[in-house]
Image: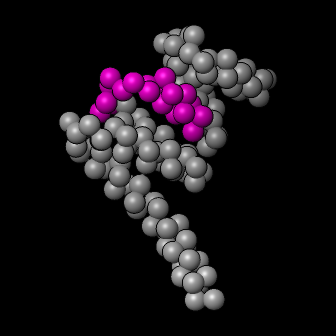
Amino acid sequence: MKILAVILGAIVAVFVLIMPITAIMASQGLKNAEKPWAAGLVFNAARIRMRLFRYGSAARIMEAGLKQFPNLPDKPKVYYQIGLCHEKRGDTQLAKQWYQEYLKTWPTHPWASQARAHIEKIEAEVL
């Protein structure tokens, strides 16, 4: 029973501390942009926030990351995810802009058809 209480306490602690931890991750990654691990830290922090339904802060972290790491190899994925974050938080017009930019820059990327489907869904909702 004590082990179960310790495990439960640890799980609760992780959930309470996850937002400050991801804030530190993003901040350290942005401050140490010259380090090889920095970009990964920033975008992992954003992806954790996406999984916790914190779409607004996830998008802001990814946008800051794009500015700090303009030569990011996963750039298409990040553009798509930013669009997804804005869509999930209800700002469909901003989401549409990110999806359109994604399609303009990477029209043959594997996720291009999904981005087009998101745009079509957004446009259908406007009508």
Give the residue displayed 58% in from the left and 54% down from the top.
52
Measured along the vertical axis of the image, is residue 118 above or below residue 38?
A: above
Q: Residue at x 48, y 40 (%)?
A: 59
Query: In terms of depth relative to the viewer, which is nearer, 55 or 113?
Result: 113
Kindly indicate the quadrant of the structure image that contains residue 110.
top right
Q: Residue furthest bottom?
A: 2
Name the side, left or right, on which 65 lies relative to 49.
left
Viewer-proximal residue among 1 and 11: 1
Asked if 74 appears above or below 54 in the picture, the reply is above
Q: Which colour assignment does the render follow?
A: one colour
Q: Position of residue 115 (x, y in %)?
A: 63, 22
Q: Residue at x 31, y 50 (%)?
A: 27
Magenta region, main secondary structure? helix
Q: Position of residue 35 (x, y in %)?
A: 22, 39
Any part of residue 66 in sight? yes
Q: Residue at x 20, y 36 (%)?
A: 34
Q: Is residue 45 above or below residue 117?
A: below
Q: Which picture quadrant has residue 17? A: bottom left
- In the picture, which quadrant includes the N terminus? bottom right
Quarter of the C terminus within the rendering: top right
Start-end of magenta stretch: 67-85
Residue 80 forms part of the magenta stretch? yes
The picture places residue 64, in percent across and down from the top left corner, at: 36, 37
- Is-magenta flag for residue 77? yes
Which quarter of the picture shows residue 97?
A: top right
How many numbered discs sit on the rendered protein? 0
Residue 62: give x, y in percent of width and height. 43, 37
Left or right: where does residue 90 sit relative to residue 44?
right
Would residue 116 be visible to someone looking at this image?
no
